[in-house]
Image: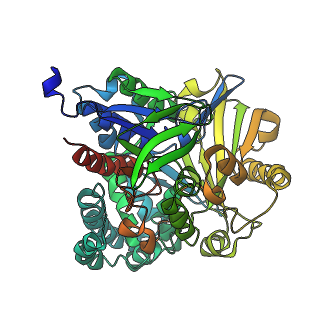
Amino acid sequence: MTPDLVPYPGKRACVIGAGFGGLALAIRLQSAGIATTVVEARDKPGGRAYFWEREGFTFDAGPTVITDPTCLRELWALSGHEMDDDIELMPVMPFYRLNWPDGTNFDYSNDETALQAEIARISPADIAGYEDFLRYSEGVWHEGYVKLGHVPFLDFASMIKAAPALAKYQAWRSVYSIVSKYIQSEKLREAFSFHTLLVGGNPMTTSSIYALIHKLEKDGGVWWARGGTNRLIAAMVRHFERLGGTIRLHDPVKAIHTVGTVASEVETVSGWKERFHAVASNADIMHTYRDLLGGTKRGRDEAKSLSRKRFSPSLFVVHFGIEGTWPGIPHHMILFGPRYKGLLEDIYEHGVLPADFSIYLHHPTVTDPSMAPEGKSTFYALVPVANMGKLPIDWEQVGPVLEKRILDEVARRLIPDLHDRIVTKFHYAPRDFALDLNAHVGSAFSLEPILTQSAWFRGHNRDDVIRNMYLVGAGTHPGAGIPGVVGSAKATAKLMLEDMKE
């Protein structure tokens, strides 16, 4: 390309944080011809999609559920490349097996015949209601994801414009409320409402817009990246560098310097300083404003405003590698506890550590044996817990106790001699989210996805005051989850490319 044809001559951008959102944004900018540098605090890229290797086992920190692969493929297609040249996505079936304490199983998938049979086995009377719910999910997916998922909400007028569609689908109601409108069986109500927990939302209070997840999975499937989610991150880094992008690892950003209402320079702990035409943060939203922009009035004011908002819960995750293979345990399981609504209230409202819990069990080796040594299996068991703002306990003391309780429950329900089979294990607690990821109150998903913290009410893709400062990731529109943060990158990139045109 000759210099006079370069669309953004001499323009440089910095993306702080190499999570899914940050890397997706960086790829979009670099594909458009903007020289982009990604600065990452940790020793490996990925953010929440970090990973560990221990005794031959590979442990993904999460996320582990890949939906809407089209939004990822688009990142390669921008420059005429194919994602499949860098990473293999493997289908997961069933999507999830749901298991209740009475021994009932429900295999959740997009195989329509199989799903209808599963519904009929639990509650034949709910088959017609499910069809109605599916139609609702399709409608809200079209309005909330296809039309609005990649649109930045920069002013209240944009929210007013979207209001009729939101009103049509009763966005003020919760996902659980909407599911309950169509489905009578309590087990099936749980089966079709639990998905909001995967993006930090309480099914009892998260806007019914999030019922679109059912349609998203039905159309796009559920996938696994061979070698782990970390290999998808590695593929994104490889593609970004192929395009000429630069990534700095293990060098936390110390400050974003400003001149008036312009972000002028990024400084790291190592002393590295660079000037950029635009800066985007994929870091925790509170960390971005309180710490990185803490030297500015805008940073202090926004941090004060954010401190009054509701942040999503945290997670307690037990990673373990064991002897033996388990073809009967699917890739994804939800082991429901004895309570649903009451447990959610304890986590989201009361801020207590309950005696019971529901577990998301991740078993990647049933799909991809490369995640463990031959004849062995990799697992993690994840339990939502209140964030540290609601539950200020000493996780160094409580962690080992909760770890044993979770492993005991997995042993009781699935693998009786689990403790004897363990080769290696460790846990990851809210305190680790706070220390490793600068996550405010140890939140695992940033701002809680309630209606009054969505779209315009969420962090804006472009800052309202610092005109070349942008946000990407879970704290901005549309929210958490891989499709959410990749969608935020699309919205933010559109703004940045428009703003940086000569």
x, y percentage for residue 319? Answer: 69, 40
Q: Is residue 332 visible?
A: yes
x, y percentage for residue 309? Answer: 54, 71
Give above or below for 150 relative to 278.
below
Q: Is residue 367 visible?
A: no
Q: Residue at x 50, y 74 (%)?
A: 205
Viewer-side residue, 158 vs 496: 496
- Left or right: 470 as drawn, with respect to 70: right
Q: Residue at x 62, y 70 (%)?
A: 348
Q: Quadrant of the N terminus?
A: top left
Q: How many marks?
A: 0
Give above or below for 60 relative to 186.
above
Give above or below for 231 relative to 328.
above
Q: Residue at x 53, y 53 (%)?
A: 293
- Left or right: 412 as drawn, with respect to 60: right
Q: Residue at x 45, y 32 (%)?
A: 232
Q: Quadrant of the C terminus?
A: top left
Quarter of the figure with residue 211: bottom left
Viewer-side residue, 402 vs 80: 80
The furthest residue to the right:
397
- Left or right: 476 as drawn, with respect to 155: right
Viewer-side residue, 87 vs 37: 37
Give above or below for 237 relative to 436.
above
Viewer-side residue, 349 vs 388: 388
The furthest residue to the front:
260
Quarter of the figure with residue 28: top left
x, y percentage for residue 268? Answer: 57, 36
- Left or right: 213 as drawn, with respect to 409: left
Chosen colour scheme: rainbow
x, y percentage for residue 393? Answer: 80, 62
